Image (cartoon, rainbow, N blue to C red):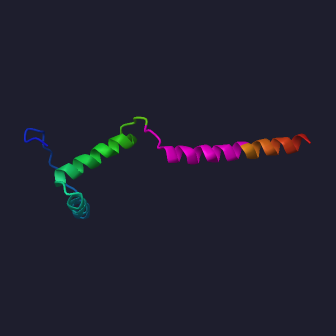
Amino acid sequence: MARDDPQINLRIPLELKERLDAASSQKKRSLTAEVVARLEASFSLGGDGAVVPIDDRTLDLFAGHVAEKVVEALDKRGKSKR
């Protein structure tokens, strides 16, 4: 972050501050960088109403679940026609 970037003052619970401190130390970045990274991530997770891309594994699990439901419905439909 540049020195001329805007600053904010905010109060947060001590426990949250300690967790942020620990996370920033673990990732070897400043507290400011940690907070900025987490805020940016929250927006990319749809916090601003944007569409969030679905990862391939989640999409595959969802598709498999839907496929199972379709097969069940078709089986049930086939049995009721007999």
Residue in the picture at 87% in, 43% down: 80
| Residue 45 drawn above or below residue 25 | above
Residue in the picture at 22% in, 60% down: 17
Would residue 4 appear left or right of 30 to someone viewing this image?
Answer: left
Would residue 67 appear left or right of 45 to someone viewing this image?
Answer: right
**Going by the picture, which residue comes out furthest to the left?**
3
Q: Quadrant of the C terminus?
A: top right
Q: Is residue 35 magenta?
A: no
- Quarter of the image where one finds residue 40: top left
- Of 1 and 39, nearer the camera is 1
* Residue stretch rendered in magenta on the structure: 52-70
Residue in the picture at 7% in, 42% down: 3
Task: Report x, y in % for residue 5.
Answer: 12, 39
Q: Quadrant of the N terminus?
A: top left
Q: Is residue 56 magenta?
A: yes
- Of 12 and 19, nearer the camera is 19
Would residue 64 appear left or right of 71 to someone viewing this image?
Answer: left
- Quarter of the image where one finds residue 31: bottom left
